[in-house]
């Protein structure tokens, strides 16, 4: 027969445990809920308190002499950049008779290339009328500048062609003069030279005609560009819808706030390193989780289940306390009220067997000074713990929060139940608590987890330490047919009793082990 054991943890654990990260971020939902709500309110408030300036828009059809079907938008992007120049801004301001600086005016408008030949101009102003007037002046200034540039380009190109034609004519005149001189000489040997001159004259005539045609084409293209560049959509003021703007800004603010909240929660979880899962808390404290309780009573339909859970926990702790001749304490970490209530329930359950005294040694006492009810045990403060009668069963309530006087905990009880709120203490502090309790010879019966994650499916039991869990003490030795227990079972019981008298902590140092021996 083979037995299987749980896989040991990896020697190199992952840098970030995704399961713990998700659980911790979900537990901090108040943070990212608040950030998302704040972003939503901020977005809606900005839409109401900071409405957009009056805006006008117009569309200009821009014709280019170099238009090609495969153009990727280079020409229209050039026009957009030309619109953002002080020259066009200054001409628009001159048309408006405004004294505003062109540099300042350029901040109030922008151009957008819709297609290769459509340019949309958006202008803001103090009023709708001013925005419309600005858009019209700016569009006209751009059209005028574009037409002027196209005409100047066409004129320069045509003039360059005509200049080249004139040079060809001068050369043609020289060739004609050479032909006339050779013909007048009548030298038969010059016939070969005349043929080359006639060929050169024909070539020059052809090139002159080509330059004339190209210059005419250049001039012909300018009217098409001038007629094609025009305002196709008259300037108009854009209507502003406050509900639509508020809804849009609120949605954007909500998304940004939610993202920021989730990021803060994730970063805080990684930096704080506060265990939330059962397995991590049990591993940090070196004790198994024996029960769980919600932090609050919850909704009405959940209160009955919470009450039954508390009753089962009281029964479990009563059995552990009844079977031990040593005093039992409850030490809290992040939940003093819950620890006080559990101690009071335990004392009430054990009051039927004899007098019980509860020592409230919490930094902020929860039980002393409260009104006593019929059947409640005696409650004293930490300063009166020495006056408790030896006949009374002692139940101590203390804390293992930072600043605890560790040497005083053994007077509350040499066996303890840790009441820990999930996600309250860091992993380093949980190890500190376990080490300090081991040094004080205080055996940990188990851990009561407060406010656990409802979706946590991890196991909070330490399977490699039966003596640290209640199940190790609840197992009864099997009887032999003759009525006696076997030697093996007696040895197991003796080993358990020795384990109860000694502190158990897997991370003890060599100096403590030598001292224990």
Image (tube, grey):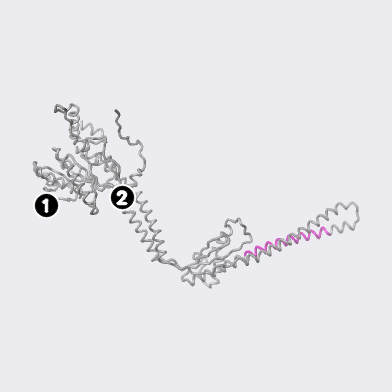
Q: Looking at this view, is 255 or 285 the one in front? A: 255
Identify the residue under disc 2. 27
Q: Which residues are magenta?
A: 149-176
Q: Quadrant of residue 508?
A: top left
User: How many numbered marks are there?
Assistant: 2
- Which of pointers 1 and 2 lies earlier in the amino acid sequence? 2
Q: The C terminus is located in which quarter? A: top left
Q: Secondary structure at mark 1?
A: loop
Place of residue 512 in the rendered image (x, y in percent of width and height, measured from the top left) = 23, 34
Place of residue 292 in the rendered image (x, y in percent of width and height, measured from the top left) = 24, 45
Q: Looking at this view, is 137 or 283 the one in front? A: 283
**Residue 441 within the magenta-colored segment of the rendering:** no
Q: The N terminus is located in which quarter? A: top left
Against 107, residue 30 (above or below) is above
In the rendered structure, find residue 373 and report the number of the disc placed on it: 1
Name the residue rendered at 53%, 67% in the picture. Answer: 58
């Amino acid at each position: 027969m083979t037995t299987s054991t749980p896989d040991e943890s990896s020697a190199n654990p992952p840098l970030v445990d995704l399961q713990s990260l998700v659980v911790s971020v979900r537990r901090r939902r108040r943070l990212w809920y608040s950030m998302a709500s704040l972003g939503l309110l901020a977005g809606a408030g900005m839409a109401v308190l900071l409405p957009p300036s009056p805006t006008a828009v117009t569309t200009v059809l821009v014709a280019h002499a170099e238009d090609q079907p495969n153009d990727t938008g280079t020409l229209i992007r050039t026009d957009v950049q030309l619109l953002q120049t002080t020259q066009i801004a200054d001409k628009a301001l001159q048309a408006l008779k405004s004294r505003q600086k062109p540099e300042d005016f350029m901040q109030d408008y922008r151009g957008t290339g819709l297609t290769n030949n459509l340019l949309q101009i958006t202008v803001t102003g103090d009023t709708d009328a001013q925005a419309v007037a600005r858009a019209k002046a700016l569009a006209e200034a751009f059209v005028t500048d574009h037409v002027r540039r196209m005409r100047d380009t066409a004129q320069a190109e045509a003039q360059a062609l005509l200049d080249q034609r004139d040079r060809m004519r001068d050369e043609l005149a020289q060739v004609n003069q050479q032909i006339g001189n050779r013909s007048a000489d009548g030298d038969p040997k010059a016939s070969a030279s005349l043929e080359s001159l006639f060929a050169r004259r024909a070539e020059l005539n052809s090139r002159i005609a080509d330059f004339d045609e190209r210059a005419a084409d250049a001039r012909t293209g300018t009217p098409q560009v001038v007629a094609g560049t025009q305002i196709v959509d008259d300037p108009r003021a854009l209507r502003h819808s406050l509900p639509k703007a508020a809804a849009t800004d609120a949605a954007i603010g909500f998304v940004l706030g939610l993202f920021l909240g989730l990021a803060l929660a994730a970063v805080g979880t990684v930096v704080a390193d506060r265990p939330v899962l059962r397995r991590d808390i049990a591993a940090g404290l070196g004790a198994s989780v024996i029960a769980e309780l919600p932090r609050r009573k919850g909704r009405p339909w959940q209160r009955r289940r919470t009450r039954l859970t508390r009753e089962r926990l009281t029964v479990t702790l009563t059995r552990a306390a009844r079977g031990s001749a040593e005093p039992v304490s409850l030490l809290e970490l992040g939940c003093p009220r819950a620890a006080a209530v559990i101690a009071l329930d335990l004392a009430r359950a054990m009051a039927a067997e004899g007098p019980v005294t509860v020592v409230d040694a919490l930094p902020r006492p929860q039980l002393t000074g409260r009104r006593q009810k019929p059947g409640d045990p005696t409650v004293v403060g930490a300063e009166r713990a020495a006056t408790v009668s030896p006949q009374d069963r002692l139940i101590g309530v203390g804390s293992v929060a930072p600043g605890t006087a560790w040497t005083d905990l053994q007077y509350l009880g040499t066996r303890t139940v840790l009441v820990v709120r999930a996600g309250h203490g860091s992993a380093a502090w949980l190890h500190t608590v376990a080490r300090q309790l081991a040094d004080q010879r205080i055996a940990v019966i188990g851990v009561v987890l407060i406010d656990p994650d409802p979706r946590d499916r991890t196991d909070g039991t330490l399977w490699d330490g039966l003596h640290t869990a209640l199940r190790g003490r609840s197992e009864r030795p099997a009887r032999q047919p003759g009525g006696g227990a076997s030697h093996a079972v007696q040895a197991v019981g003796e080993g358990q009793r020795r384990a109860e008298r000694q502190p158990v902590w897997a991370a003890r140092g060599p100096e403590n082990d030598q001292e224990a021996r």
